[in-house]
Image (tube, rainbow, N blue to C red):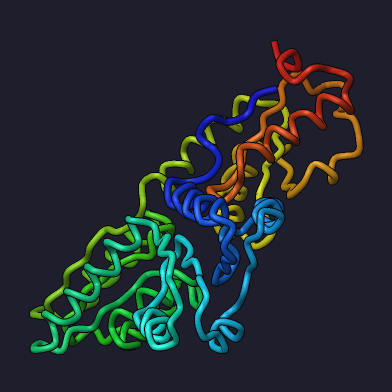
Amino acid sequence: MEIDEGSGFCFGVINAIKHAEKELESGEALQCLGDIVHNNQEVDRLEKKGLKTIDYSNFNTLNGGKVLFRAHGEPPAVYEFARQHNITVVDATCPVVLALQRNIKRTFEKTRDIDAQIVIFGKHGHAEVNGLVGQTGGKAIVVQNMNEVSKIDLDRPIVLFSQTTMSIAGFEELISYIETHKGADVIFQYKDTICRQVSNRIPNIEEFAKKKDWIYFVAGDKSSNGKVLFGHCKAANSNSYFISSAEQISEPLPLWVNSVGICGATSTPKWLMEKIAEKVAQINNTKPEQAEQ
């Protein structure tokens, strides 16, 4: 049995959790605006340490207190609300996302004189995308897939960015479409802002899955990154199974299975994959380190 070394928390999530644990050690009350990571088991672990998860409706009633902003980042309006209501912000925005926010804000301000469209290739309603759109005062155009390209005015200047976790292939397809359909003299710029720590996991996880007879892919049900990675995992190995906890494993492996792989999303903690490896070994009467020779 092998746990994929390339799976598990990305740097941004590790950074956010370190921020949370450091604050919780002080014994002060700490609230997190939204799930700190899209993994229920990790959220539960931190809640037992004292972290309370709140949503925006809760946040908008606060006056004082300490709130952690997770790796996805927040729009300027949320920071301003915190300032006006004496809320202490523990800012755990991923440095990659933070750099992207600044890039979009700067570009938006510099292109007002040519009335450029700021286009973001990203998922509607995603926390990161909301933070990015906020850098433009809500004027950025979000395009999630090729079915939405009609939102872009191909006769006006365009500057294209991407949410950090979108697929490179999808981004390149959108670039190609705009380049071949825009007006001849229309200014078009694009900035590849996809995080390679996330995007490089696709070929790595495909390679890992191909080498095993059986794969347990571990991720939370709300993890969009997990759904994408599992799709690639399943395509590489049809005997791949999506699970969120060790409790979902109740049956021994088929007798023909000689090699088992455990992998997961950028929101999957290593301790959870290790727990699942222990459960697999227990059910199959093997030791984790001896399950695969």
Q: Nearer the viewer, residue 192 or 186?
A: 192
Q: Nearer the viewer, residue 239 or 283?
A: 283
Residue shown at 57% from the left, 63% from the top: 28
The reply to whether residue 260 is in sight is yes
Is residue 79 rendered to the left or right of residue 242? left
Task: Please state the total of marks drawn on the protein image.
Answer: 0
Q: Nearer the viewer, residue 33 or 7?
A: 33
x and y percentages locating residue 143 in the rendered image: 40, 76
Residue at point 56%, 51% (across, down): 25
Q: Is residue 42 above or below residue 87?
A: above
The image quarter in which residue 177 lies:
bottom left
Q: Position of residue 7 (x, y in %)?
A: 54, 38
State which quarter of the image contains the C terminus.
Answer: top right
> Is residue 146 in sight in this rendering?
no
Q: Position of residue 267 (x, y in %)?
A: 57, 51
- Residue occupying image coordinates x 48% and y 47%: 14
Seen at 30% across and 79% down, the residue is 135
Q: In terms of image quadrants, where is residue 54?
A: bottom right
Please indicate whether residue 177 sits to the left or right of residue 41 in the image: left
On the rendered image, what quadrant is the N terminus found in? top right
Give x and y (percent) for residue 111.
13, 82
Name the residue at the front extreme.
27
Q: Is residue 291 left or right of residue 248?
A: left
